[in-house]
Image (cartoon, helix red, strand yellow):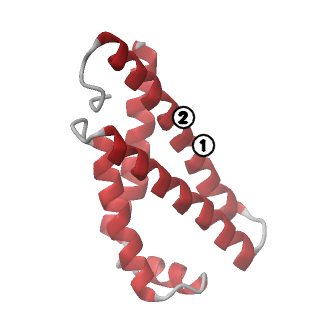
Amino acid sequence: MKSVKITYWVTTLIIFLLDSVLPAFTSNSQAAVEGIRHLGYPDYFRVQLTVFKVIGGILLIVPAIPARFKEWAYVGFGISFISAAVANAAVTGLNGFVFIPLFALAILIVSYICYHKLLDQKTRTGTRPAQA
């Protein structure tokens, strides 16, 4: 179970750092503004997406958050990664920008699987399930 816990925290921290912390600090950069514009999205979508990514990251990383909220954060990140891959494929064709969000999705899936393994273990031992 220790390896599952380590895998959970490593993968969850990767998602948190790359898709919550990084966008929080770089969403107003010229590259981010141009990237959203290049995909055909309005500028307000960049701001909205950043806010939801930060909230989702907090939901995933704080152990005391109830499991139901974590589930929705996983769904939100999953939709975001799939949408990013589809948008990049539609606008620029099949290239590296399509596979980066799919790689992030794979990391998210590993985090999700480990989260549920830890949740099941804590439920069996009678401890509070939300603190995976």
Name the residue that disc number 1 marks. 106
Q: Within 10 angstroms of label 1, few (less than 14), some, or many (20 or more) residues?
A: some
Depth check: give the residue in front, 112 or 93: 112
Residue 21 shows in this picture: no
Residue 89 lies, in percent from the top left, at 73, 70
Q: Residue at x 25, y 35 (%)?
A: 63
Q: Quadrant of residue 116?
A: top left
Percent x, y of residue 123: 34, 19
Q: Residues within 10 Å of mark 2 (few under 14, many from 20)?
A: some
Looking at the image, residue 32 lies above or below residue 58? below
Left or right: residue 5 versus residue 128 is: right
Dot 1: element: helix
Up-down relation of residue 78 to residue 93 (above or below): above
- Name the residue carrying label 2: 110
Report which quarter residue 131 is drawn in.
Answer: top left
Q: Nearer the viewer, residue 10 or 65?
A: 65
Name the residue located 59 percent from the left edge and 66 percent from the top edge: 84
Badge 2 amino acid: Val
